[in-house]
């Protein structure tokens, strides 16, 4: 069977592949610790689960409007108003099967061959692949640890050309955990607005922030910036609802209408029961969210302390998410069982083979000097993982 060139060019998600490999080894009885998955280890809060149960008991099991029920749209509108003082109407909201689905739909209604989309590196693994499926290309802006993985206004200006259609910002960021302050975002978004470049603001981790960091949305900066911003968010990360698959987009109604049309010919509506649960999540208080966030912060602090004891390892302090992105280039050139560690893939293979710890190589995110570890796991598991990693690193 001849496959399309489009699918042959597409790379599978390395984060999901590594998580699947770790789970397969566990199923075989191997004592593997998987730190690759990007999902909270907490259960979905009870009040959200109850909302789903109530929806089932009401027989809310039929098709809904393609872009979401009025109830979930109103809950999203309320969230955006409470969190950022930004006003939207139902026509501005499209609910999809996860934030990734929202980004996929957005890309396919906006971009085509010849367009360029600016993405900073390190980047979430799916951005370049989704962009490439549309025929557009990705223009990468390299960032480094010494600037907390943030692009400068000068870098952005230099990257924009006549083919530039959009700038994707992810703050706090997967994989680095770093985030832009409001002033930093205003500087970048001001350039984008002046140049007619649409801003795609991926805010999926906006509730998981530490040390008093204040997340911002460009849509709140001005009326003009709101019109020039597409907000991406969802229920997965903040509410421990990865499997429920609810994401949303907030944007101008012409883009929302186009996405609604595309979705009508692909998935149709997101799951009705999941929409009811997510509506409860968005309408609820943040007591459970904050409890999870506080636990993530404790784990982050523990992990950073352990990195300090590992030879050749350093790490920028994340201000959000549940990821760390340590630099392991200090071990490059060293040998393990006669094999030289030349990059992040070599290191990850070594760590999995020797100590049965699965992490994601930084090359998947465009940064080969690094690895990504998720600390969305118990402190007991994290402690054992650090013991194993420290043993592996210090024995090189």
Image: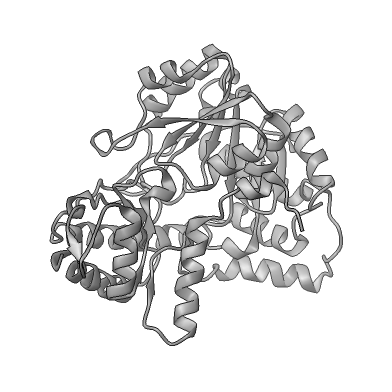
Viewport quadrant of the N terminus: bottom right
User: Residue furthest toward the right?
Assistant: 62
Residue 243, quarter of picture: bottom right
Tell me which residue sits at (46%, 49%) in the image: 207
Query: Can you say whether 378 is above or below 65 in the image?
Result: below
Return the x and y of residue 116 as percentages of the image width and height. 57, 25
Viewport quadrant of the C terminus: bottom left
Asked if residue 395 lies left or right of residue 91, the reply is left
Front in this rendered view, residue 130 or 97? 130
Residue 91 showing in the rendered view: no
User: Residue furthest toward the bottom?
Assistant: 29
Asked if residue 302 lies left or right of residue 272, the reply is left
Front in this rendered view, residue 82 or 308? 308
Query: Can you say whether 107 is above or below 226 in the image?
Result: below
Tell me which residue sits at (67%, 36%) in the image: 134
Query: Can you say whether 153 is above or below 125 in the image?
Result: above
């Amino acid at each position: 069977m001849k496959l399309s060139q489009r699918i042959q060019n597409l790379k599978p998600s390395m984060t999901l592949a590594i998580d699947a490999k770790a789970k397969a080894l566990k199923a075989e009885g191997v004592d593997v610790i998987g730190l690759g998955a990007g999902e909270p280890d907490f259960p979905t809060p009870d009040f959200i689960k109850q909302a789903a149960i109530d929806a089932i008991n009401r027989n809310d099991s039929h098709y809904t409007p393609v872009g979401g029920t009025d109830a979930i749209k109103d809950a999203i509108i309320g969230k955006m108003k409470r969190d950022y003082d930004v006003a939207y109407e139902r026509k501005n909201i499209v609910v999809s099967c996860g934030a990734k689905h929202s980004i996929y739909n957005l890309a396919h209604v906006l971009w085509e061959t010849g367009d360029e989309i600016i993405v900073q590196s390190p980047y979430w693994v799916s951005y370049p692949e989704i962009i490439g499926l549309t025929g557009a290309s990705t223009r990468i802006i390299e960032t480094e640890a010494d600037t907390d993985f943030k692009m400068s206004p000068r870098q952005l200006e230099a990257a924009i050309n006549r083919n530039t259609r959009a700038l994707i910002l992810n703050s706090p960021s997967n994989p680095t955990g770093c985030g832009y302050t409001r002033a930093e975002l205003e500087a970048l978004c001001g350039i984008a607005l002046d140049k007619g470049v649409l801003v795609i603001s991926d805010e999926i981790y906006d509730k998981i922030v530490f040390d008093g960091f204040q997340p911002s949305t460009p849509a709140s900066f001005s009326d003009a910036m709101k019109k020039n911003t597409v907000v991406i968010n969802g229920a997965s990360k903040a509410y421990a609802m990865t499997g429920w698959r609810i994401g949303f987009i907030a944007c101008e109604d012409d883009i929302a209408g186009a996405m609604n049309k595309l979705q009508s010919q692909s998935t149709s509506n997101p799951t009705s029961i999941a929409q009811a649960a997510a509506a409860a999540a968005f309408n609820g208080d943040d007591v459970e969210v904050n409890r999870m966030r506080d636990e993530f912060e404790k784990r982050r602090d523990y992990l950073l302390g352990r990195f300090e004891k590992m030879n050749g390892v350093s790490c920028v302090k994340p201000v959000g998410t549940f990821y760390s992105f340590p630099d392991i280039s200090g071990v490059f050139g060293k040998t393990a069982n006669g094999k030289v560690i030349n990059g992040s893939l070599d290191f990850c293979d070594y760590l999995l083979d020797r100590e049965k710890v699965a992490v994601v190589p930084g090359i998947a995110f465009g940064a080969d000097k690094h690895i990504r570890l998720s600390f969305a796991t118990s402190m007991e598991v994290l402690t054992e993982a650090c013991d194993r990693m420290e043993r592996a690193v210090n024995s090189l």
